[in-house]
Image (tube, grey):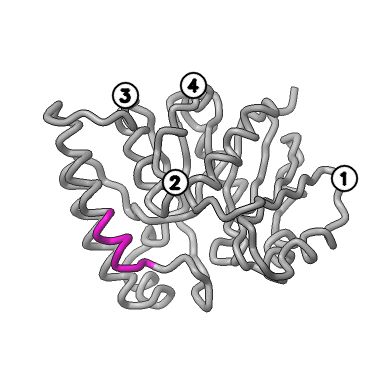
Amino acid sequence: MKKKLLIFIISYKASYRVLNVYKKIPFKKLKKYKTKLLISDDASKDDTIYYAKKIKNKNIWINQNKKNIGYGAHIKKCLNFSIKKNFDYAVMIHGDGQYDPKYIPNLIKKIESEKNVGAATGSRTLGGLKRLLGNMPYYKVIGNIVLTNIFNFLMNKNYSDAHTGLWAYNLKFLKNKKFNYLTNGFNFDQEFRFRNILSKKTIKEIPIKAKYGDERSQLHINYAIQFLFNTLMFFLIKKNLFKSIKFK
């Protein structure tokens, strides 16, 4: 029996770019899965839904939130939908086109490679610093390297990119829905990564290239400060020096 895969595209003011993202999904390489698509918009006041409705595909759901709920809350909503509909795997793609859907098959292969893989991510830094410098704005390079190294040191891990927004999820490990305790904000991915660490689930990485232009998913100073604060909190939790309801 084919495994069920949901590809969910989260968008906010993505406009025509959400259509471009859809056109890049490699459906032919996903024939071994029963694949469906969810385009979910976070209350954009533009023409994103207009372009989403241009997609002629019987295996698609389109959702528009009545109010803006935030990055983390939006992912939670899509993951809860995935579980409710009994999917085996889910992949998150950003509607702004920063992450190319062509990597989806490789992400799923990583999830299926071992029994204990909770998620797979696309890493912009695998493949060497030279490639990274040619593809990512310098302030992002510096921030990524510094913050990822701090996270790895305190968590005793060796992730190459702790800030990626390209994720594939093994939904059999999310049925307890404890991810709903995590933040509704931009640091959801970081908190989700830590939850996998606590539950001793492996996160696999594949090398990717990302596109940078006028996308809104930028590494802001607020994100960096929160990332550092969270990492210190994670360290204390890991050492049983602090407790948080998010990670019970």
Instruction: List the residue tagged with mark 1.
Output: 58
| Residues at marks 2 and 1, CA–CA distance in whole angstroms | 31 Å
- Label of residue 248 in the image: 3
SS for callout 3: loop
**Of the pair 167 and 225, the residue shown nearer to us:** 225
In the image, which residues are magenta? 219-226
- Which quadrant would the C terminus be assigned to in this image? top left
For label 2, the residue is 184
Question: Residue 56's spot in the image, x, y percent?
Answer: 88, 55
Magenta stretch: includes residue 222: yes
Q: Earlier in the sequence, mark 2 or mark 1?
A: 1
Mark 3 → mark 4, Cα distance in angstroms: 12 Å
Vertically, is 43 above or below 219?
Answer: above
Which three-letter amino acid code belongs to the residue tagged 1?
Lys
Q: Quadrant of residue 183?
A: top left
Q: Quadrant of residue 1?
A: top right
Mark earlier in primary sequence (2, 4): 4
Is 133 colored magenta in this rendering?
A: no
Q: Write the residue at 47% across / 28% down.
A: 114
Classify mark 4: residues with Cα within 10 Å, few (<14), some (14-19) or many (20+): few
How far across and how far down the image is residue 125, in percent? 36, 61
Type of amino acid under label 2 = Asn
Residues at marks 3 and 4 touching, judged by CB atoms closer than 8 Å: no
Position of residue 51 relative to residue 194, above or below, is: below
**Residue at image point 34% right, 70% down:** 140
From this view, report whether residue 170 is shown above or below residue 167. above
